[in-house]
């Protein structure tokens, strides 16, 4: 085929642009063991760091004796808070406006907290020496319950004693962090007072952990000759890390190069800054040698950022016909020992105010109280946008609770309350402007796909069989319609540490018509090198296979806020399209010059500009690229490249309809997912295969969270789930089959209409699984039971309902 | 997750292995597949100066299926137990239980000897061996001796094996035709220890039932077995519930475990009895 005879469709297909299920280019190296992760980085003279961690959840650190550790051959240094204090680095700022100890400064506030940092010639010596650091502790009373913490005389944060004002307003108690209020309290209370029906329930979303396969780590390398610090690490936001390192270390930002190499999953766990990064940087500056720190699995689960831990007290008001009139929510948020949530600055509870969900709820009120306890800090968005999974779980449980109260079918209750297609853009009672949606179409498609009526008939028969003693298994149908809010975000209201949450892309076209693009984001498995090349391919008509993507090196990539909260496609994806359009605009001028016509007399045609009305006269992008480098074109600079910094005008609002069909054994609490249907609407679909993979992965993490995964503490603050024996990470064995489906409702404000999808399956999946468990027991009187729904908790439901005779 | 330092030994015969154990006393431990010991070492809950690897000892390998007795070398892996057709014909219960242990990767390394000798109450094979009335052959400085599986377990991680003895072989009587078998295990996920597991043999007027991870040793109950031999299923369950002594852990509280124990036992009995004899 040549360029003259190929149809436009054939030429478009050759580009493997948007809509193509192009295979992931990253997988060539990953499947051959050729990825390059932090722990693969080996530098000359590299030392290793290991932490001494507190076995207690709350204790004074009376004394740290380093002598025995320092006596071990190969030990280079043992750092404590005392050593970091002269540098001002014994504490560091958190992303939430709080500060956090780097190494224990007089006391510890959670089990696993970093107390000392041992630096040695290899990781084995470091581990042995860490055992020999003698720490004298004096145990203090432990607070693991946020409600108790708000009543207790025990002061957790003595450093904040007397401070009645925090980063987010007044503090009501010495263990209180903030109160965040949204919506109209008085109006909502009035609606609740006048409503035909009010359903009230406490919805707890337990503490869990993102648990990426690769734990957190870094290699800090200070070159004393050049004065330049190179910091390799598992960073979801490498540029932000560079700025933070500069701000807290005093090193000039141009002397810091942060590199995120391949990252083995992040899920929010790798957004924040950890003590290991600070200690490694200090150790490298002090020793002049590179220092590597890589945490082990237990350290990752016990000390790095957790997720959720929200106690959500809800009230939902409706007419007797089921039209929802108001929603009230008070959340008690357990933040652990330090407020290290990773949220945009003005949103201390993230986007929890998306908790009106997919429903047209005219009046609503939300208050969130953040509380200190003796648990690990964190509160990150684990495969969801900021606190959106909590919000979605809350509203999707409240809908079910209301359906019970109204004695209504929960699918129908949702249908009559959905925001209608003609209401978009929709202003929610809690302050958001939903960009686009068509919930009824998605819902009807989903119900039809699973034969909802048939499932309810089967369930009715099953209940009859159960009551007659013919079976001991129940059938649950878990419904969810979720609305995500992703793509943080508009600089006007979204920043992290004062850094506006725009993102960026720089594209350079090479003379032979291939290209390199660099972005401010960083893939942790999302497949950016595959999908962003597809956006460029469609926008400028060069094959995706000829476009290299680079991310994660702050010396080469343009500034961006990184990858989390499904923001890469909504923000950096938009920047990519905009940068590509700048290139196409210049290419148009070059083409017009080459074709000897006016700029306005050429038109874009897949991979070329052709003369209007004379399509046989054209210049392909390949030809244009070469001309950009070899022709002196009047009025145009040589070269063909562009950069775009994109500040989105709004968030995007992906949505979906998920249905889970579950079998439950009432005698053992065992469950089996018989069917899981996931319909996602993420707007324009860039790579359907990657979307499907994202949905599979996200629903699997949702399965884990809903059905067993938790960070549990005993009353002494000991972590009970510190290994993968007890922390549920599903394998292929536990993972059900999924059916994926979609509708397409493009975002009206995004350059290509895409909305982001990576986190939707977790947001929608958790309530779908949980609602299936609840639905199975609903006919027997269950209203609410907290996750995780592991065997014994399901058994306890059955036991409590008298099902064990 | 880095263990404390240790010396590694890889003797080629049983006598040399025993010699190393004698030389180093409680500083030394034998290691088979390592799937219990190595995690404990990485957690620094077990530290020993000398690790005696039994992989290179051929005398500890091999499956012999005789007319009346099956002999398993202690270094036979779970994978070999699953894939040995003669064994599956002689005592199908072993394959059925081995398939419930961990995952294929672990089963390539994990051995039957390590599983029974470690005395971990969570392991599946000890209860199974008690159900099957196996005998463990031990070699030590004073020669060889045999201990019945039903007499082997004293408490969690404490067994009748002396510190300088090595479990070399397991002898299992082949159940008569007509004796039907089943293994039922509830677990939270692949790779987990049992919430409760039951091994059942019943037929020809005899029965044997044992349970796993419901006390600090496996539980074989003579009274539960006799009740089942007499056809009294509920009597069997009731006797077994008296014999077990579970503790609360992340799998659930005692009340739940007892309930599940009864369910597993009933299901194992049902399934055994429904099988062609």
Image: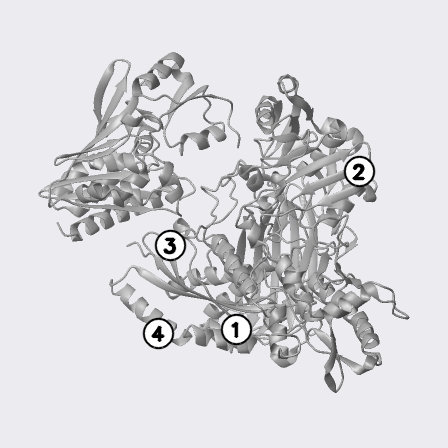
| x then y, percent, for residue A58 | 61, 33
Asked whether residue A42 is in view, the answer is yes
Earlier-in-chain disc, 4 versus 2: 2
The subunit carrying tag 2 is A
The lab-note entry on whether marks 1 and 4 share a chain reads yes
Q: Disc 3 on helix, strand or loop?
A: helix
Q: Please determine if labels 4 and 2 lie on a single subunit.
A: yes
Question: Label 2, label 3: how many angstroms apart (C-alpha)?
Answer: 64 Å
Q: Are marks 2 and 1 in contact (CB under 8 Å)?
A: no
The one of A332 and A196 positioned closer to us in this rendering: A332
Same-chain check, marks 1 and 3: yes
For the residues bearing labels 3 and 4, Cβ distance under 8 angstroms? no
How crowded is the residue under tag 3: few (<14 C-alpha within 10 Å), some, or many (20+)?
few
- Residue that numbered label 3 is attached to: A800
- Of callouts 3 and 4, the N-terminal one: 4
Quarter of the C terminus of chain A within the rendering: bottom left
**Of circles 3 and 4, which is in front?**
4
Residue B87: x, y in percent? 21, 41
Residue B76: x and y, percent? 30, 34
The residue beneath circle 2 is A228
**Chain under numbered label 4:** A
Chain designation of label 1:
A
Q: Nearer the viewer, mark 1 or mark 3?
A: 1
Q: Nearer the viewer, residue A662 or A614?
A: A614
Q: Which residue is mark 1?
A: A414
Give the total of numbered labels: 4
Q: Are marks 1 and 3 in contact (CB under 8 Å)?
A: no
Q: Earlier in the sequence, mark 2 or mark 1?
A: 2
Q: CA distance from mark 1 to mark 3?
A: 29 Å
Q: Which residue is mark 4?
A: A457
Residue neighbourhood size for the residue with mark 1, other residues' Cα within 10 Å, grouped as few (<14), some (14–19), many (≥20): many
């Amino acid at each position: 085929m040549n360029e003259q005879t190929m149809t436009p469709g054939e030429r478009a297909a050759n580009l493997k642009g948007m809509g193509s299920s192009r295979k992931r280019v990253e997988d060539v190296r990953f499947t051959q063991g050729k990825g390059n992760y932090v722990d693969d980085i080996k530098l000359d003279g590299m030392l290793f760091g290991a932490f001494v961690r507190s076995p207690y959840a709350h204790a004074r650190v009376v004394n740290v004796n380093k002598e025995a550790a320092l006596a071990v051959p190969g030990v280079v240094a043992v750092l404590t808070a005392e050593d970091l204090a002269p540098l001002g680095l014994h504490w560091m700022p958190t992303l939430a406006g709080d500060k956090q100890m780097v190494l224990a400064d007089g006391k510890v506030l959670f089990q696993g907290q970093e107390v000392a940092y041992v630096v040695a010639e290899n990781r084995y010596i470091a581990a042995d020496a860490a055992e020999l650091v003698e720490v004298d502790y004096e145990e203090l009373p432990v607070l693991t319950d946020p409600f108790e913490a708000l009543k207790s005389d025990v002061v957790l944060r003595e450093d904040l004693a007397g401070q009645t004002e925090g980063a987010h307003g007044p503090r009501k108690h010495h263990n209180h962090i903030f109160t965040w209020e949204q919506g109209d309290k008085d109006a909502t209370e009035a609606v609740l007072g006048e409503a035909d029906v009010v359903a009230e329930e406490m919805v707890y979303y337990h503490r869990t952990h993102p648990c990426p396969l690769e734990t957190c780590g870094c290699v800090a390398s200070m070159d004393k000759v050049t004065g330049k610090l190179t910091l390799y690490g598992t960073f979801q936001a490498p540029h932000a890390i560079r700025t933070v390192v500069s701000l807290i270390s005093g090193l000039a930002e141009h002397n810091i190069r942060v590199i995120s190499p391949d990252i083995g999953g992040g899920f929010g766990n790798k957004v924040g800054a950890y003590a290991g990064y600070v200690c490694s940087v200090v150790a490298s500056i002090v020793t002049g040698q590179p220092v590597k720190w890589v945490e082990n699995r237990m350290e990752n689960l016990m000390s790095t950022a957790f997720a959720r831990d929200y106690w959500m007290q809800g009230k939902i008001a409706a007419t007797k016909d089921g039209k929802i009139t108001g929603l009230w929510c008070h959340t008690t948020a357990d933040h652990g020992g330090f407020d290290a949530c990773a949220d945009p600055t003005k949103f201390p509870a993230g986007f929890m105010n998306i908790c009106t969900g997919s429903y047209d709820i005219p009046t609503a009120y939300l208050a969130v109280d953040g509380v200190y306890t003796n648990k690990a800090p964190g509160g990150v968005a684990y495969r969801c946008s900021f606190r959106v999974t909590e919000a979605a779980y809350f509203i999707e449980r409240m809908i079910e609770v209301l359906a019970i109260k109204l004695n209504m079918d929960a699918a129908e209750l949702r249908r009559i309350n959905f925001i209608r297609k003609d209401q978009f853009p929709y202003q929610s009672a809690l302050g958001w402007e939903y960009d686009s949606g068509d919930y009824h179409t998605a819902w009807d498609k989903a119900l039809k796909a699973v034969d909802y009526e048939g499932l309810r008939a089967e369930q009715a028969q099953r209940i009859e069989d159960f009551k007659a003693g013919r079976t001991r298994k129940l059938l649950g149908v878990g419904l969810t319609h979720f609305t995500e809010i992703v793509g943080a975000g508009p600089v006007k209201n979204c920043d992290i540490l004062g850094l506006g949450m725009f993102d960026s892309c720089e594209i350079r076209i090479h003379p032979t018509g291939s290209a390199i693009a660099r972005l401010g984001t960083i893939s942790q498995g999302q497949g950016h090198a595959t999908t962003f090349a597809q956006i460029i391919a469609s926008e400028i008509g060069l094959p995706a296979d000829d476009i290299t993507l680079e991310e994660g090196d702050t010396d080469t990539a343009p500034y961006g806020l990184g990858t989390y909260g499904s923001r890469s496609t909504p923000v950096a994806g938009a920047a990519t399209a905009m940068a590509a359009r700048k290139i196409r605009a210049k290419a148009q001028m070059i083409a017009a010059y080459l074709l000897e016509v006016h700029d306005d007399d050429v038109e874009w045609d897949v991979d070329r500009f052709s003369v209007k009305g004379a399509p046989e006269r054209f210049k392909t992008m390949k030809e244009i690229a070469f001309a950009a480098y070899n022709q002196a074109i009047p009025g145009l600079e040589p070269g063909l490249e562009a950069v775009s910094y994109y500040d989105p005008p709004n968030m995007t609002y992906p949505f979906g309809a998920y249905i889970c069909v579950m079998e439950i054994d009432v005698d053992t609490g065992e469950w089996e997912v018989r069917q899981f249907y996931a319909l996602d609407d993420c707007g324009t679909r860039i790579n359907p295969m990657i979307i499907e993979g994202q949905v599979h992965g996200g629903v699997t993490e949702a399965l884990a969270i809903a059905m067993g995964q938790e960070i549990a503490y005993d009353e002494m603050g000991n972590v009970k789930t510190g290994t993968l024996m007890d922390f549920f990470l599903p394998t292929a064995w536990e993972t059900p089959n999924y059916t994926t489906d979609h509708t397409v409702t493009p975002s009206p404000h995004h350059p290509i209409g895409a909305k982001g999808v990576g986190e939707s399956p977790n947001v929608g999946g958790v309530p779908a699984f949980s609602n299936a468990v609840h639905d199975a027991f609903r006919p027997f009187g269950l209203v609410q039971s907290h996750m995780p729904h592991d065997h014994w908790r399901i058994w306890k439901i059955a036991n409590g309902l008298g099902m064990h005779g | 997750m880095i263990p404390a330092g240790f010396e590694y030994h890889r003797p080629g015969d049983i006598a040399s292995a025993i010699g190393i154990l004698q030389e180093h006393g409680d500083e030394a431990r034998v290691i088979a597949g390592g799937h219990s010991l190595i995690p404990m070492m990485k957690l620094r809950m077990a530290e020993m100066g000398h690790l005696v690897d039994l992989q290179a000892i051929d005398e500890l390998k091999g499956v012999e299926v005789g007319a009346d007795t099956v002999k398993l070398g202690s270094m036979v892996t779970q994978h070999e137990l699953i894939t040995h057709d003669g064994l599956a014909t002689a005592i199908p219960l072993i394959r059925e239980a081995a398939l419930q242990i961990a995952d294929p990767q672990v089963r390539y390394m994990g051995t039957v000897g390590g599983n029974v000798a470690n005395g971990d109450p969570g392991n599946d094979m000890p209860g199974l061996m008690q159900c099957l009335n196996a005998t463990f052959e031990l070699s030590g400085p004073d020669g060889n001796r045999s201990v019945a599986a039903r007499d082997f377990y004293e408490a969690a991680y404490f067994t009748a094996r002396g510190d300088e003895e090595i479990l070399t072989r397991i002898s299992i009587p082949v159940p008569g035709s007509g004796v039907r078998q089943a293994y039922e295990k509830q677990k939270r996920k692949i790779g987990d220890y049992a919430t409760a597991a039951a091994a059942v043999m019943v037929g020809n007027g005899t029965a044997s039932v044992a349970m796993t991870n419901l006390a600090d040793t496996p539980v074989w109950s003579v009274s539960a077995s006799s009740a089942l031999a007499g056809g009294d299923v509920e009597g069997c369950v009731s006797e077994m519930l008296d014999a077990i002594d579970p503790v609360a852990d992340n799998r659930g509280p005692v009340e739940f475990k007892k309930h599940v124990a009864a369910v597993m036992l009933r299901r194992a009995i049902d399934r055994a009895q429904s099988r062609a004899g």
